[in-house]
Structure formats: C-alpha cells, structure tokens
Amino acid sequence: MKKTIEQLLPLWGMKNRQVTQIYPSAWEIAPSHVIKIYYDKDQLERNIRISSILADCRIPVAQITHTQTGEQYATAQDAYFLMSEKLPGSNLFDPQDKKAAYEMGRAIARLHLAFVQCEKEMEFWDNSLLAEMKGWIPETLSAHNWPHITESEHTRFVCMLEKVSDRLPRQLIHRDVHFGNFLFHEGRLSGYIDFDLTQKNIRIFDLCYFLAGLLAEETETPLTKEQWLKLVHAVITGYESVNRLSDIEIQAVPCVMECIEILFVAYFTGTQDTKHAQDACRIFHQIQDYEAAIEKTLSAGRLT
C-alpha cells in the first residue's frame, strides 16, 4: 500500500515525500498531510459531506486537499484515497489529567451541537443500543454458549435499559469517542477526526463509551477507582458547561456504560478475540462494582 500511495502522490502535485503508516487505514505524508484509505465509496462521500457541514459550523476538522484536476479523492486498486491537511496538535494525552478530561467533555458537547445541524442536511443510519441489546448481541453470545457474560446478566441490563431508553434524547453521535480521535494543542481542542461510525443513537452513548474506555487504557499505572471517578466528574462537568444533560441521562450513565461493555464482549466473542472479550467483561464488572460511587459522583456538584 505504501508503494501505491507513493505512486499516487503526483496527483496532488507531490513527490519524494516520506510516507508513514499511522493507523491501519491512514498514512502520514510528511510533513503536512494525511491520506486515509476507504473501500466503501458511500462511506467516503458521507464523511466528506459531514466534514464540510462541520467546517461550516466552525468545528475544527481536517481540510480536504483536492487533486490537481480538482477531484476530492483518488481511486486505485478498488480503493479510494482521501488526502487532507494534517491538523495541529496531538492525540497523546495523560488519561489521568483532569483538565484534559474536562476539555474532552466540552469537545464532545460542541461536536454534538454541531451534529444537530448535520442531521438537518443529511440522512444517517438510525441505530439503537436497545435494539442491539435485544438482537445481534444475545444471538452472538448464545451461539458461543454465553462466555464471559451470563444470560441472566444480559437479561438484567436489557430490562434496565428498556425502562429508560425511550426517555433518553437521541441525535447524531460520533460513536467512536476516544483521545485518538480528538486532537489537542497546548491543552485546547485543535481538531476532530474519523467519522466512519457516525450514526443516530442515544446522546450519552458517546460520553459513556469514552468514560468506560478510560478503564481500558493500557498504561503502566492503571487508573484507580478514585482517579477514574474524578475523570468521570470532569468529563460530565465539561460537557454540561456547553450542553446540558437531562436528569434521566445522568441516572442512566452506569447502565449505558455496562451495556456498551456487553456489546464489546459480544463483538469480540464473535471475532474470536478472547483477550479483548475478557477485557470488556472485566470492565463490565468493574463498572458494576462502581455503580453507587458513579451515581454519587455525578450528583455531587452538578451544574444547576
């Protein structure tokens, strides 16, 4: 793939640039650009449209670099190559940094507000965490004889989510919120990347996905319960400084985090990735143990 990209660079008037893979589907064209590879044309064109709308809303997203003939992307070997300017900043952040967590909450909130405008101008996949909890998730776990998560545990959380799901605000969400997809420069947000999984779903999915993901961060010193709870408070406080959450959303945070981890257990079970399935199960039980503390943390010092 590196050779193919090097051969395509003259289409953008570039040559003899250093090409370095940074993600499975993304390559840095040093020093100033990135090429992302797509195999689904519809997804590519949808992401281009999302980026355009977000830019109009003054949301920092990567600017597309057109080819010398004015095309938005290049095509080769049944793949599509989208070049964009490299955003300033880094996605490397200390997960124990409360200030970073607060800014991340604000960043998610600003993106959610901008996504409301996207919904007015485009159609998106309308997904439901509850439908997944009732559909492919139990089907997958049952097919593998309920490894890691028991059927009774799954049933319990389906019932819990079902009680609140229709009262949880729905809108367009990012669906893959982690520090890697949000860039920061000198402590401030400098850009958003990767809208491949963008969909309509419950709004707090993004917050819960991010908060649960902090427990999965592989660092030399894993977060203690107290450290993680401080980050939970910082993220939610940051979010609410921009975009108010409803009381039912606050109450549903632990349940939604637990359902997301059940989703990951099912996904990794289906792909026969035992390690990550076990990791998701560990986080699921960890959040269960923290439920009372999470509720206390979220109710303490909440914006009025």
Image: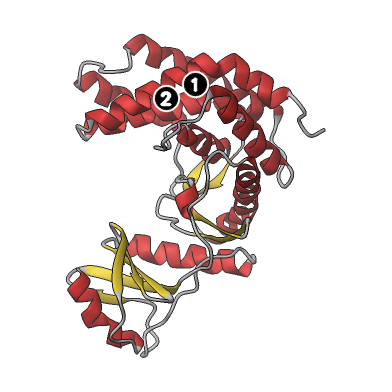
Does residue 228 appear left or right of residue 272 in this picture?
Answer: right
Secondary element at tag 1:
helix
> Would you say 62 lies left or right of 303 here?
left
Tag of residue 283: 2
Where does the image place residue 280, in percent across and percent down from the top left?
36, 27
- The residue at the point 35 percent across, 76 percent down is 73
Using the image, determine if residue 290 lies above or below residue 182.
above
| Image position, residue 194 (x, y; %) | 43, 57
Report the front residue among 132 and 289. 289
Q: Residues within 10 Å of mark 1 (few under 14, many from 20)?
A: many
Residue 35 sits in which quadrant? Answer: bottom left
Estimate the x, y position of residue 264 in percent, counting from the top left: 35, 31
Q: What residue type is labelled 2?
A: Ile
Q: Is 198 above or below relative to 228?
A: below
Residue 243 position, x and y percent, is: 71, 44
Q: Which amino acid does label 1 sit on?
A: Ile
**Other-residue count near label 2 (Cα within 10 Å), few / some / many at <14 / 14–19 / ≥20:** many
Q: What's the residue at 37%, 82% (across, down)?
A: 71
Outermost residue toward the top in this view: 152
Q: Residue at x 62, y 60 (%)?
A: 186
Q: Which of 64 and 129 is in front in this view?
A: 64
Observer able to see residue 134: no
Q: Dots 2 and 1: beta carbons under 8 Å?
A: yes
Disc 2 secondary structure class:
helix
Give me the C-alpha separation between circle 2 and circle 1: 6 Å
Name the residue tied to disc 1. 287
- Where is the C terminus found, in terms of image quarters? top right
